[in-house]
Image (cartoon, helix red, strand yellow):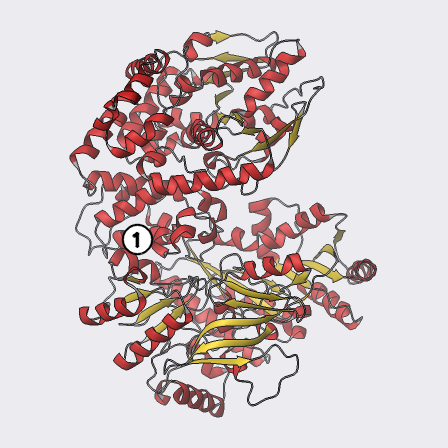
Amino acid sequence: MTPVSKPASVAALAPSLIARLREIAGSENVLTEPEDLIPYGFDGTAALKHGAACVVMPQTSQAVASVLRFAVAEGIPVVTRGSGTGLSGGSVPVDGGIVLALVHLNRILEVDPANLTLLAEAGVITKAIDDAALPHGLFYPPDPGSMKISTIGGNVANNSGGLRGLKYGVTRDYVMGMEVVLPDGDLAWLGSKCVKDVAGYSMKDLFVGSEGTLGIITKVLLKLVPRPKARRTLLASFDSMEAAARSVSRIIERQIIPCTLEFLDRKTCQSVEDYAKVGLPTEAAAVVLMETDGHLAVVEDEAASMEAIARECGAISVEKAADEAHAVRLATARRSAFSALARIRPTTILEDVTVPRSHLAEIVAFVEEVAARHRLQIATFGHFGDGNVHPTILTDETDADEMERVHLALGEIFEKTIELGGTITGEHGVGLAKKPFLPGQFDEASYRLMRQVKRSLDPAGLLNPGKIFDLEESRA
Amino acid sequence: MSVSPANHRVLRHMGDLDYSVVQQCMHCGMCLPSCPTYLETRRERNSPRGRISLMRAIADGELEVTREFGEEMYYCLGCLACTTACPAGVDYPKLFEHARAEIEAQDVLFTPGRRFWRWLTLRQIFAKPWMLRSVGRLLWLYQASGLCFLVRKSGLLRILPANLRDLEPSTPPIQRRFSEDLIREIEMPARRRFRVGMLTGCVQDLVFSDVNRDTVEVLLENECEVVTPRDQGCCGSLHAHNGDLEQAAVQARRLLDQFDLASLDAVITNAAGCGSHLKHFSNLLGDDPVYADRAREWDRKARDVSQWLVEIGFRKPVGESRETVRMTYHEACHLCHGQGISREPREVLRSVPGLEFIELENATHCCGSAGVYNITQPEQAGKLQREKAACIAKTGAGLVTTANPGCHLQIQNAVGEGVEVRHPVSLLAAAYRAEKGGAK
């Protein structure tokens, strides 16, 4: 088999610039050897990479500001990075640029149980936030798949989602304030601990999901909520996606908002069964994992209703967890979905198109049809409650012919998503991977607005340039 | 991994690998929080996906096999925690072994001292059973005669390199009698259900021959006839993990010659580091015209002792203990990550009367022993050892169990005299003996 990647041509930084960076950030925090740089050439996105000219790992917000001030003065592009688990290429380096890795900004500065807030530096691991909330009986709900290693700064910059979106919302819903390094090197504090705060523009919201293109988030003030006391888990199998969708709609019509409503399609069910042998019915075309949390009496009641609804809608089987261990067992199918799929072929491309919930069965069927037409293996799983689906393309990036078909299929899936009133990315961000497809979703006025915002904050275009969209209109 | 046209150098060992092995890594980053060296530095090159990206860069002709790459691959513990964390099933052990072999083939870490020590240990002491035992006897004499006390006092140790000098006090206590003095070539149970081969190992043979004896007794209690060929020597795990795949193949062939596989239901090891290696002899000998079939049969039959006991439904010892001992269990990396065996040793331990089992925090984290890592990278190994000791102290256990000689010694050195370290099988053997009114 022939490797795909060609030797990368990386524009190096002049030795005098490197020397000054070492002075500013501390020599031990500046990496320049090829063995150090190659591993920063990618993030969690398949088939995207580019060499970095240098990596800087600052220890404080002040150091971030100093590095940025220097970079802007010298006209060097800067790509900010947390743990590099992004799924759209947002933190892939740009030519001749600095990679600013914030993993050393990893202190939790305050947990405030009186105001239900937590203040953390940007490089704190997402899971560590929830772990710090736990002893206070508090809860940080957003749980992206990479939460064991993703950083909170990266989550905020990408407005990450997770499995609990339907009931608890996404990262944005928990950001009350932040410290941002602006491209001129100044530190700005945005937002406050106040539940109500309408002083001026809600600038923090501009930075949530900005993918490192407007400023560098160095601290985040987060909202916490009371930790639910009880949880009940059910697993239902259906012989069609339509039946599963019917039952999900009916659950929501009956005004039950489960914290989890996750589904697997037929192909995913088969792969999971081959890999983990969890005992899914062989005729299952859709498996739905449902979870309700909150007060004990309420969750009992809701679990019973969900079970009844699933049966009304023709579930082949419904299993309700008797205890915590049983619940973990039921969740195994959903939790092994990605692992089961990722083993099948050398390259795994994970998408995250999102449609209004009522169109979910339709988009899943469409993906199946596209896969058959382009002779591709595509399995779909995801978040039923919020219409966020993960068509997962199992392929081989070294097979040029197959990759051509992958791109055709992706284009069609994005087109259909937009036609159904959806979005090409629900939780991964645009980055590089989805940049070519964004114009289909945005009208010209929206594009112009984004460019105006970008130009006014980052006139030199040095912060994560070329991500989300290009500044030049012709390339839009 | 095939080499790109741009890459004119010949990769001897990494060239043997299919490119898809390195391509299987989708660099999602799920391995990062499991990797002890990444957690130490937070630098990508010190992480599994970072190391794989370097291997891929070498295969793609973007990077030479450099000294820096060599040092990176020896900074890796080879603990395989990343393989448990990996959603895509990347065969990291294979990548790790071939990368180290390539580093040795290109000799990028060459120093005269390193070459000598590697020759002495890999090609002499651990290649020849008689030599290993002679070294063992000498060490035993040195320790038993009190000479070690004199040497320590005399300052003679100053002639040794610093890292070896620091290690001298923790030289493992050698047993007076080795496995062959304790185990007959064939031992028959009262009633026979199975016939198994017994691996005596190298370190296990010299330092823990009592664990080998206990293993045989437990197997006999469970109706297994035990065949223990003489002069076994090292299984080659040490060689494979340290970049000497050629010698590893020699060691594997020797073992295949010694065991009459067709007559055996299983080949049993009680050392995790050996088990995780010797279940993959076909990786070494898959293309060998003479040994390939036997290597595959061997892979099918190789079992960790706890795995085998659970598989055959081992007999739970009866009786109760007057006192309860608080015990915890450290999972050897090459058992839990290397072989996916976590449940079975616990099942063995829970069957032993008189034990209060407290789970160890971070039980699957490496203790820093990692083969010869505590010799080659004493600083990082020491950090992991102290973390492990702190977790053990939190349990309040007076007894720690683990199923690998390296971990056993590393933990014994960490916890000191007050805490006992045992192999789970030894506790089971003691429980069987206690049934008969025998000594623990």
Specify the subunit that label 1 lies on.
B
How many labels sit on residues? 1
Q: Amino acid at mark 1?
A: Leu
In the image, residue B31 sits, relative to residue A380, either above or below, namely: above
Relative height, residue B340 to residue A338 (above, below): above
Percent coordinates x, y for residue B155 in the rendering: 25, 24
Residue A78 in the figure: left or right of residue B85: left
Estimate the x, y position of residue A2 in percent, counting from the top left. 29, 54
Q: Residue at x 65, y 63 (%)?
A: A139
From the viewer's perspective, tell me whether residue A214 is left or right of residue B125: right
Q: Nearer the viewer, residue A464 or B154?
A: B154
Would you call the spot at circle 1 few (<14 residues within 10 Å), some (14-19), or many (20 or more)? many
| Badge 1 element | helix
At a point 41% along the width and 90% down the height, the residue shown is A456
Say left or right for A398 vs A351: left
Q: Is residue B271 left or right of residue A176?
A: left
What quarter of the picture does the C terminus of chain A occupy?
bottom left
Along the viewing direction, whichever of B395 and B34 lies nearer the viewer: B395
Residue at the spot x=53%, y=51% of the render?
Answer: A340
Question: How far from the left and from the top, in percent, is residue B227?
Answer: 47, 12
Q: Where residue A266 sits in the image (x, y, percent)?
A: 61, 57
Position of residue A165 relative to residue A72, above or below, is: above
Q: Nearer the viewer, residue A51 or A358?
A: A51
Residue B223 occupies which quadrant of the picture? top right
Q: Is residue A402 visible?
A: yes
Task: Work out whether residue B291 can be spotted.
Answer: no
Residue of label 1? B54
